[in-house]
Image: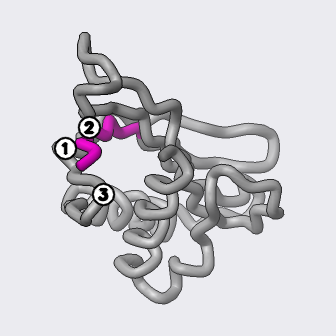
Amino acid sequence: MRLELENILYEHLKTSLPAELKTMLVRGHTTDDRHIPYISIDVGDIKPFGDMIEEDGIFESEITVAIADSAHDINYDAQFLRIAQVRSILGNFILENNKYRCEGLWFSSETDARDDNNLGVVLTYKLVFQRL
């Protein structure tokens, strides 16, 4: 289920991002090289929602989206625009197919993410969905 949902969210971003950002998008569960700048989406562990059990069919997962650029050659205006575009796209996410229905995708935090070579943020969302 985890990879399936990650693919759904990846495809949603891929079809919704402006053309110049589509090439930056990479899957979270991959060993592929991430060329800078990049946007990576990762679906965390899936567990039953709240105190429910798996048989109830309602689940939750933490979604993280890393948006990074080179610390040595960054365009801050472009980076902030990337962040705003991703937040807008995911803020309007709706999922209803023959297998799942998204009960909510809520933004929960934006965390500074940097190392010696990269500057960026990690956007964290909570996904609540029903298995049909």
Q: Which residue is mark 3?
A: 99
Q: Which residue is mark 1?
A: 104
Mark 2–mark 3 distance (CA, rounded to whole Å): 14 Å
Mark toward the start of the polypeptide (2 vs 1): 1
Which residue is farthest bottom? 19
Mark toward the start of the polypeptide (2 vs 3): 3
The disc label shown at residue 10, or none: none
Mark 2–mark 1 distance (CA, rounded to whole Å): 5 Å
Measuring 74% from the left and 55% from the top, which residue is drawn there? Answer: 30
Mark 1–mark 3 distance (CA, rounded to whole Å): 16 Å
User: Which region shows up in magenta?
Assistant: 124-132
Q: Secondary structure at mark 2?
A: strand
Is 49 contained in the magenta span? no
Residues 89 and 70: in front is 89
What amino acid is labelled 3 in the image?
Lys
Give residue 68's position: percent from left, percent from top.
62, 55
56 relative position to 19: left or right: left
Give residue 111's position: percent from left, percent from top.
47, 33
Measuring 80% from the left and 48% from the top, which residue is drawn there? Answer: 117
Which residue is farthest top? 51
In the figure, residue 90 lies in which quadrant? bottom left
Instruction: Tell me if mark 3 has few (under 14), some (14-19) or many (20+) residues whose alpha carbon lies within 10 angstroms of its own.
Output: few
Residues 122 and 98: in front is 98
Instruction: Tell me if mark 1 has few (under 14), some (14-19) or many (20+) residues whose alpha carbon lies within 10 angstroms of its own.
Output: some
Q: Secondary structure at mark 3?
A: loop
Q: Which residue is mark 2?
A: 128
Contact (CB < 8 A) between labels 2 and 1? yes
